[in-house]
Image (cartoon, helix red, strand yellow):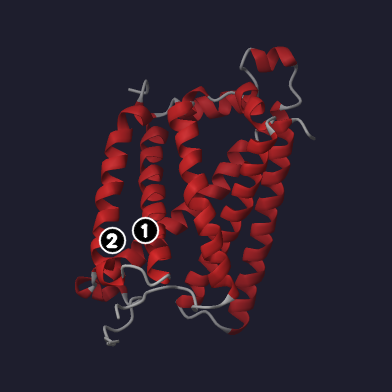
């Protein structure tokens, strides 16, 4: 069997969620890049254009799910990478707390921005 | 028949000359992951200019002089930002392709070709990024 390199303990819940979010993000991140660089050019983005996209419920829901899964995947990935470098004890708990707060703050701010862009708030 | 190898810790970066394809894939996936999560925080910070922009008068939004539009278009007018965006694309495409490779590895599919699929990820990333350069740099130089 080939060697296996991973920052995650195989079979753990964080390992499973990291892969479930990955499967979703593979598709949505590619879509996001394609839509905002090839269909609409990033240099031509305006508030009116962003609002028009975000007023569509399907798009808004996709973008909010994109934010939430990307935040979890990113923060969980950073945590796993730090554990992999040998983080233990109080430092481990402190890092976990800081990353959880940063992740929740990012998700809250991003969701609020998305709702304002869509005109819901 | 399973076989185990003892190649030491992959975290011991000083041994980089001895690294195999799988170890390089692990390091590049980690590096691109750090870049992407860092960018995510920056991205939401920049997009938060939509909050004051949403309070602007409709004439200001129609004239595209609101703070969201001017901030984004101001950033996009900088050649450095456009070049960094090409770098971001490279990082994202590699992370996506190697991520798909990792999902297959975790499912136990194609393990005997995991080194070849890593090289394929690099080649396809390079091809997509090079083909995208004209679109990403359009109108900035």
Q: Residue placed at 31% from the left, 28% from the top?
A: B134
Judging depth in this view, the residue of A62 and B88 nearest the camera is A62
| Labelled disc at residue B118 | 2
Q: Is residue B11 above or below residue B50?
A: below
Where in the figure is residue B70, as x and y percent of width and height? Answer: 57, 23
Judging depth in this view, the residue of B69 and A64 nearest the camera is A64
Q: Chain of mark 1?
A: B
Q: Is residue B6 found left or right of A114 in the rendered image?
A: left
Q: Residue placed at 42% from the left, 35% from the top?
A: B81
* Helix, strand or loop under label 1: helix
Q: Is residue A47 found left or right of B81 in the rendered image?
A: right
Where in the figure is residue B113, as x and y percent of width and height? Answer: 25, 67
Q: Residue furthest right?
A: A121
Q: Is residue B128 found left or right of B36 in the rendered image?
A: left
* Helix, strand or loop under label 2: helix
Figure quadrant of the C terminus of chain A = top right
Figure quadrant of the N terminus of chain A = bottom left
Judging depth in this view, the residue of B8 and B119 nearest the camera is B119
Q: Is residue B14 found left or right of A115 in the rendered image?
A: left
Quickly name the residue at label 1.
B98
Gap between marks 2 and 1 measured at Cα? 7 Å
Q: Chain of mark 2?
A: B
Q: Quadrant of residue A61?
A: top right
Q: Residue placed at 35% from the left, 46% from the top?
A: B90
Judging depth in this view, the residue of B125 and B70 nearest the camera is B125
Where in the figure is residue A30, as x and y percent of width and height? Answer: 46, 43
Sequence-earlier tag: 2 or 1: 1
């Amino acid at each position: 069997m080939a060697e296996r390199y991973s920052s995650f303990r195989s079979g753990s819940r964080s390992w499973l969620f990291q892969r479930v979010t990955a499967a979703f993000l593979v598709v949505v991140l590619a879509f996001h890049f394609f839509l905002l660089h090839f269909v609409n050019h990033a240099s031509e983005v305006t508030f009116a254009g962003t609002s028009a996209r975000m007023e569509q419920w399907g798009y808004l829901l996709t973008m909010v799910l994109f934010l939430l899964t990307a935040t979890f995947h990113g923060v969980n990935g950073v945590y796993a990478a730090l554990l992999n470098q040998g983080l233990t004890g109080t430092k481990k708990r402190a890092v976990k707390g800081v990353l959880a707060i940063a992740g929740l703050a990012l998700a809250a701010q991003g969701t609020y921005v998305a709702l304002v862009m869509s005109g819901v708030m | 028949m399973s076989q185990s190898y003892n190649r030491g810790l992959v975290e011991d970066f000083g041994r980089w000359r001895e690294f195999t394809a799988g170890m390089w894939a692990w390091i590049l996936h980690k590096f691109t992951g750090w870049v992407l999560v860092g960018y995510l925080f920056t991205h939401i910070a920049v997009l938060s200019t939509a909050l004051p922009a949403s309070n602007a008068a409709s004439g200001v939004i129609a004239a595209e002089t609101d703070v969201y539009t001017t901030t984004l278009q101001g950033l996009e007018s900088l050649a450095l930002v456009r070049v960094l965006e090409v770098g971001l694309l490279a990082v994202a495409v590699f992370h996506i392709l190697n991520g798909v490779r990792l999902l297959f590895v975790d499912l136990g599919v194609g393990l005997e070709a995991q080194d070849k699929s890593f090289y394929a990820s690099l080649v396809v990333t390079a091809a997509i990024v090079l083909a995208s350069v004209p679109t990403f740099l359009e109108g900035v130089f």
